[in-house]
Image (spheres, rainbow, N blue to C red):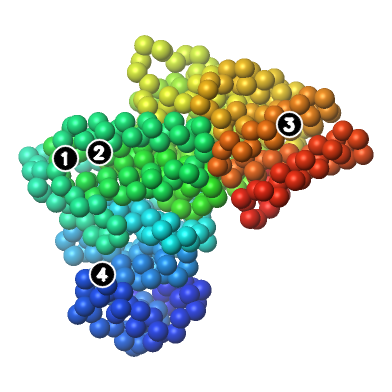
Amino acid sequence: MTGHTNTRLADLFGLAGWSKGELARLVNRQAAAMGHPQLATDTSRVRRWIDRGETPRDPVPRVLAALFTERLGRVVTIEDLGFVRHGRAGKRQDVRKEDNPDGLPWPPDRTAAVLTEFTGMDLMLNRRGLVGAGAVLAAGSALSSSMTDWLQTDPTRKTTPQRTTDPLHADPAGFDRYEAAPIGSEEIEALEYSVEVFRAWDAQRGGGLQRKAVVGQLNEVGGMLAYRHPNDLQQRLWGVAANLAVLAGWMSHDVGLEPTAQKYFVIAAHAAREQGDRPRAGEALSRAARQMVHLGKPDEALDLMQLAKSGAGEGMLPRTQAMLATIEAWAQASMGRGQAMRRTLGQAEEFFVSDRRDQETPGWMQHFDEADLHGMQALAYRTLADHDAAAALPAQRHAKIALDLRKDGHNRSRLFDYISMASACFIGGDLEQAERYAREALGAMGETSSHRTWHRLEVMYGLTGPYAGDARMGELREQIALALTKSPVTSPRTGQA
């Protein structure tokens, strides 16, 4: 008990619209449904949780998380409620610090519990048709300051022999938890293959159609991690968890579930560190940086990129360094820092050409090829063109190269290239090429379930405004406007996607 108001719980309580007595009754009913019929909560206890900062005993925090998740239509975790969790030795961790409300970084045994709890509630929202976009994004600077030292160290490994039946002492999730049991290498190989299938589907069709399947698979892996397997198998499981969490985050970002996406990226970084793969952890955080640029927060993205690069360590392959550099350049372009952007893109090219093809490229880097390098360069220059129209020409050049190099199965990236090319042509005044690529983009819009493509199409539509008096442009504008009426994106954007 802190003696102070639990402001996080108070805010969520206000949003939910319950009375204290009503919440007490709901807690008792939900606890009974979760197998705890003995629980008896009353109005005075609810008041103490909110007004005096008292942390209730298990299973009440999990029960409250489930109730608020269903009521608000977004994932609400125990940390979101402002509660502390019990450590393995009964110690408490203070998660109420304003600059680090999620108690980052998590201890090793917490990662599997957080992963399973979060995915379970995410699946619950999916089943009931609710929308998970109402939470608040953590600032990139807050994530960076709380995770920097932790990410640069290696996790402590147990030296005592492990038994396959030795469970982790992690908080039980209580939601859609996979019934954990020891597994072998064949099962992990099947899980690793499923990651490749999901990754290919995401590249081709976008994140909307397979997100629930990925989250469900990740939930099962969280249950498997509740048992300690031999170290080699346990590390491979952590690798599967990291890859699935990145995919779940990227797919969530692709359909506009931004706070949910960020949580998955943080989970992925924790899982990768538990695996001992620091470059993977850095790449996961770079996804969160790309998300910040998309949301118009390039300064936060640069904070995250510093964390991603420092956390990835010295074992990063040049191709990974190239990819990280392109994201940093995009953030710089969003801030109008043309000189810094060009310098960073130059570094990206140098890293890419120095990559030794005799080194095995990890699966999570397979999709960053030469086409992606030029696609990101096109996006950076096109973004800079909002500040300096001269950047439109190099944007067109890189977009054309990216389109020529794009392989089958990368439909979403090809669509982004079309939009980058058309947008750069509109800015540069090349209306013939602008119309050509805008129509290519319109023709490809139905091939993916990505909301981000609609955001960028909307921004491209804004660039046609100066040419509204042209007869052909007027017809094109009508077609784009008609297409936008079919957009799944409910809130219009004004910034660059």
Q: Are marks 2 and 4 in contact (CB under 8 Å)?
A: no
Tell me if residue 385 comes above or below residue 486 in the rendering: above
In the picture, the quarter occupied by the C terminus is: top right
Inspect the image, locate mark 4, and give the three-letter code of the amino acid beneath it.
Met
Q: Is residue 258 visible?
A: yes
Badge 3 element: helix
Secondary structure of residue under mark 4 = loop
**Total marks in image:** 4
Residue drawn 60% across the image and 28% down it: 414
Q: Nearer the viewer, mark 4 or mark 3?
A: 3
Which of the two labelled residues, at mark 2 and mark 4, occupies the earlier sequence position?
A: 4
Looking at the rendered image, the disc whose residue lies closer to the viewer, 2 or 4, is 4
Crowding at label 3, few (<14), some or many (≥20) Cα neighbours within 10 Å? Answer: some
Query: Which residue corresponds to mark 1?
Result: 183
Q: Disc 3 and disc 2: Cα gap in Å?
A: 44 Å
Name the mark on residue 237.
2
Q: Can you tell which quarter of the image residue 276 is in?
A: top left
Rendering coords of residue 2 (x, y %)? 34, 76
Question: Which residue carries the number 4 mark?
Answer: 34
What amino acid is found at the position of numbered circle 3 in the picture?
A: Arg
On screen, 376 above or below 296? Answer: above
Q: Earlier in the sequence, mark 4 or mark 3?
A: 4
The answer to whether any part of residue 343 appears in the image is no
